[in-house]
């Protein structure tokens, strides 16, 4: 397991919308795939989840768009485990453009779910141990203003 995992990609032409930038729905797919890759890197693979009782569901997420991404532009995603317990993991992922500017952020709360009962369950201890190893290996960081952000129209 890489102790700090970074996902890298390039904006594909088919990801561009009518505004000539990365389509908003595609951000969600990219971030979701990055979470899958992070879990794969930790050994909490799709195959593991299909062959064992425990899988994971997203409970809530929030995406902030900060910079446009254009076709063929390189970007990378830096995932951060903010917190976890025996049933949940709270992730904050940051997408950076090729100039190392924050392009988008994605915050997600996920829960361990039984493949059989379709109810919450505890993560297997081996998965919690992997979360703990990754969490401890991360460098602490100051969270950006998008973290925990509540959407709303500011009123005077």
Image: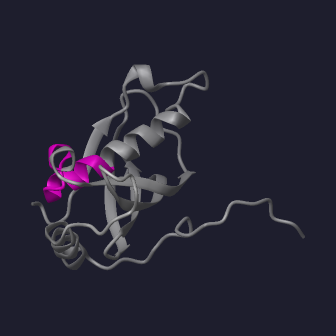
Percent x, y of residue 49 = 21, 49
Residue at horizontal 22 percent and vertical 70 percent from the top: 131
Residue at horizontal 46 percent and vertical 40 percent from the top: 27
139 lies left or right of 92: left
Q: Foreground residue, 62 or 66?
A: 62
Q: Quadrant of the C terminus?
A: bottom right
Q: How many marks?
A: 0
41 lies left or right of 118: left
Q: Quadrant of the N terminus?
A: bottom left
Residue at horizontal 20 percent and vertical 67 percent from the top: 124
| 150 vs 45: above or below | below
Percent x, y of residue 145 = 56, 69
8 lies left or right of 95: left
Asked if residue 40 is among those painted magenta in the image, a careful observer would answer: yes
Magenta stretch?
35-48
Q: Foreground residue, 42 or 156?
A: 42
Residue at horizontal 16 percent and vertical 54 percent from the top: 41
Q: Foreground residue, 128 or 144?
A: 128
* Corner quadrant of residue 2: bottom left
**Colour scheme of the picture:** one colour
Percent x, y of residue 46 = 21, 44
């Amino acid at each position: 397991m890489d102790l700090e995992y970074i996902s890298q990609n390039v904006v594909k032409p088919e990801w561009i919308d009518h505004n000539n930038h990365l389509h908003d729905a595609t951000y969600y797919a990219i971030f979701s795939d990055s979470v899958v890759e992070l879990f794969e890197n930790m050994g909490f693979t799709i195959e593991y989840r299909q062959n064992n009782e425990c899988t994971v569901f997203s409970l809530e997420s929030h995406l902030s768009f900060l910079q446009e991404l254009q076709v063929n532009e390189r970007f990378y995603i830096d995932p951060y485990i903010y917190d976890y317990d025996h049933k949940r993991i709270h992730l904050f992922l940051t997408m950076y453009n090729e100039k190392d500017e924050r392009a988008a952020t994605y915050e997600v709360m996920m829960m361990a779910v039984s493949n059989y009962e379709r109810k919450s369950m505890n993560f297997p201890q081996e998965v919690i141990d992997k979360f703990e190893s990754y969490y401890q290996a991360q460098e602490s960081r100051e969270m950006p203003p998008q973290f925990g952000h509540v959407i709303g129209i500011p009123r005077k």
